[in-house]
Image (cartoon, grey):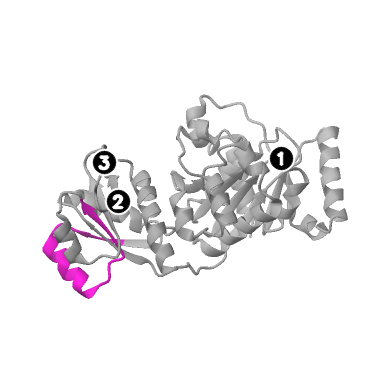
Amino acid sequence: MNKRITAIYDADSAFGEQFAEFVNDKERVPISIVSFTSLKELNNYSSDHGIELLLISSGVSNEEIEQIGADRVVLLSEEKMIPFGEPYPCVYKYQAADHLLREIMEEYCVASEDKGYTVVSERSRVVGVYSPVNRCLKTSFSLAMAQLLSRDLKVLYLNLEDCSGLAGLTGEAYERGMSDLFYYYRQGTFSFSRLGAAIYTWGDLDYVPPVQYPEDLAFVSSQEIAGLIRQISEQSTYGTIILDLGQMGKRAADVLEVCDGIYMPVKEDCVSAAKVEEFETYLAASGHDAMLKRIQKIKLPYHCTFGRRDNYLDQLLWSELGDFTRQLLRKQP
């Protein structure tokens, strides 16, 4: 993927260099940042290179900014209270790096839409996790698998449950998520940069927060969900996408069609077995019988070693479930 040139200028050299390193290490981000601590060096660079996005200290005068000739400018403010009347959009620079990156990506969305950019990349492998059975550790398994894979691969975790509980597990107050991506897709304005603006990070794992309200998922058709997932897999730079499906009823079949592989957690009781049989019968009757070959049923080990939920995601990796998931992944081609 050819990344777009972004320049950052700040008198604090450590800030500019560290943020540039943070962004440049992320393959999912469609921009490459070059850091400067001298306006003279920045002007010399801009005379030979087109700068599509300039991140610059709010203390620099408008005249000096205009001389640089960047396509789009975002001011870096040292104050949380952003003054009105600024000719350029402004972000607070002393916040978590991933939060700052999301705000900058919002501005990049506008710039990239103005120029009609698209991203060309290899299609991601999509792994679905679904079960018609409740309380089967589906989400815990999905999160464990996503975290383990993210140690060696670029992985994106997407949760399609109406009430996932993910905000309570991560302690994040989400501002963007799947609700926004569904809106962009239905409006025909989804893009790789909009995806980047909605991504949060847990350790090495990137994820998009689930829908804000259950209605946001209920009012989207299964074809639209599948279309969005397909577009993400074609336009993003992730090697693997983990798709954690909730109780979507028979709509799940259309979404699972975009998956290259499917894990189905099951339980041994007769009621659970009957639910699985009914779902398989539906797949065969509705023309999705080829999907049955891609479904791998798994019986997950129940665990009782967890403490507080604020470090549940970390504990997953060292639980019986984490060990099971490691062994399962080692057997995969």
Q: Is there CB contact under 8 Å for labels 1 and 2?
A: no
Tell me which residue sits at (46%, 48%) in the image: 199
> Seen in the image, is 1 located left or right of residue 4?
right
> Seen in the image, is 275 located left or right of residue 188?
right
Distance between the Cα atoms at labels 1 and 2?
41 Å
Distance between the Cα atoms at labels 2 and 3?
9 Å
In magenta stretch: residue 37? yes
Lower sequence index among marks 1 and 3: 3
| Residue in the foreground of this view, choosing between 269 and 259 | 259
Which residue position is annotated with label 2? 89
Q: Which mark is residue 247?
A: 1
> Seen in the image, is 57 located left or right of residue 113?
left
* Label 3: few (<14), some (14–19) or many (≥20) C-alpha neighbours in 10 Å: few
In magenta stretch: residue 238? no
Tell me which residue sits at (66%, 36%) in the image: 137
Distance between the Cα atoms at labels 1 and 3?
43 Å
Provide the residue span drawn in magenta. 33-57
Lower sequence index among marks 1 and 2: 2
| Image height of 37 relative to 317, above or below | below
Residue 24's quadrant in the figure?
bottom left
Which residue position is annotated with label 3? 82
